[in-house]
Image (spheres, helix red, strand yellow):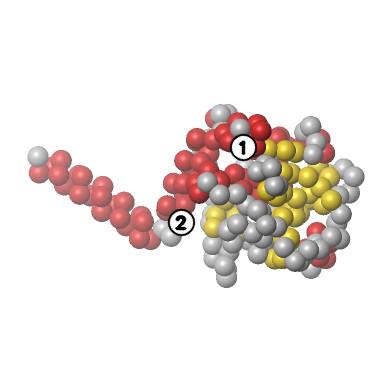
Amino acid sequence: MRAIAKRATQKILGLVKRREYDIFFEEKEKISHFYKTCFKDEKWRNPDFGLTLFPEITGNLKRPEYIFPEMNKVIDVAFDSYADYFGKDKVYKAWKKIADAMDYKSIQSRPEKDYIYLHVGGDEPDLLNYSYNDGVGQNILFMTPLEGIIAAFRYRFETGRMYDVVGLTRFAALDQNGRAMFMYWDYDGKFYVDGRGRDLRNSERGLRQVSF
């Protein structure tokens, strides 16, 4: 009995130490739960935190997201998983397949292997009144379509709230027609992914910064 109690105590102490020294301990658990719950394919259900590094926190960029770069090629998996979880009547994409519509050469450079990025989080973009051209011209790192869909998906999954109820988040990528891609909540309650002018600015719309 003493041996069993000792092992249990050591396990608890080990867990406490992990929580104490790993500031992202709870976020890792949340991210793992999100992928295991919301994605059907085993390929996307097991984030490997042992092979990825968390970026250093800078300013307000504190919320982590785990990204499988290979999902970029089949980005509709992320969007369609959102639709499967919340309902196909709760989403809208301007193209039959985002993967076919996206200009992959325009996407901001990202690591080739699984990576973790940090962002501010919250309901609305942190860089308001910035156009796509502003972000690119000022060398700002801001969310790609995949990063945005995953962040919006996990946020709603955990909180029940949606991104961009007031504004709109522009992505660091263009569609095949040269339009800046973006996401937002529309008046009909749907999660939208669409594309518009690269130089558009609005005081309630903008970019979401990232670091990795």
Residue 64, image quadrant: bottom right
- Does residue 21 appear to the left or right of 109 in the view shown? left
Residue at 42 percent of width and 52 percent of height? 26
Question: Between disc 1 and disc 2, whose residue precedes?
Answer: 2
User: Which residue is at a point 41% across and 58% down the rendered structure image?
Assistant: 22
Kindly identify the amino acid type of the residue bearing the numbered disc 2.
Phe
- The residue where tag 2 is placed is 24
Q: Is residue 146 above or below residue 118?
A: above
Considering the numbered disc 1 on the image, is that residue within a helix, a strand or a loop? helix
Q: Which mark is residue 3?
A: none
Q: Is 197 or 76 nearer to us in this picture?
A: 197
* Residue 180 placement (x, y as % from top left): 82, 52
Q: In this figure, what is the number of numbered marks?
A: 2
| Residue 81 visible, this angle | no
Q: Are marks 1 and 2 in contact (CB under 8 Å)?
A: no
Spot occupied by residue 205 in the image (x, y as percentages of width and height): 73, 60
| Identity of the residue furthest to the front in this view | 187
Residue neighbourhood size for the residue with mark 1, other residues' Cα within 10 Å, grouped as few (<14), some (14–19), many (≥20): many
Residue position for label 1 = 82
In the depicted view, which residue is nearer to us: 96 or 16? Answer: 96
Instruction: Report x, y in % for residue 212.
Output: 62, 58
Q: Is residue 133 left or right of residue 22?
A: right
What residue is drawn where x is 86% and y is 60%? 199
Amino acid bearing label 1:
Tyr
Q: Up-down: is 56 above or below 110?
A: below
Report whether residue 30 is seen: yes
Q: Is residue 56 left or right of residue 19?
A: right
Q: Residue furthest bottom?
A: 59
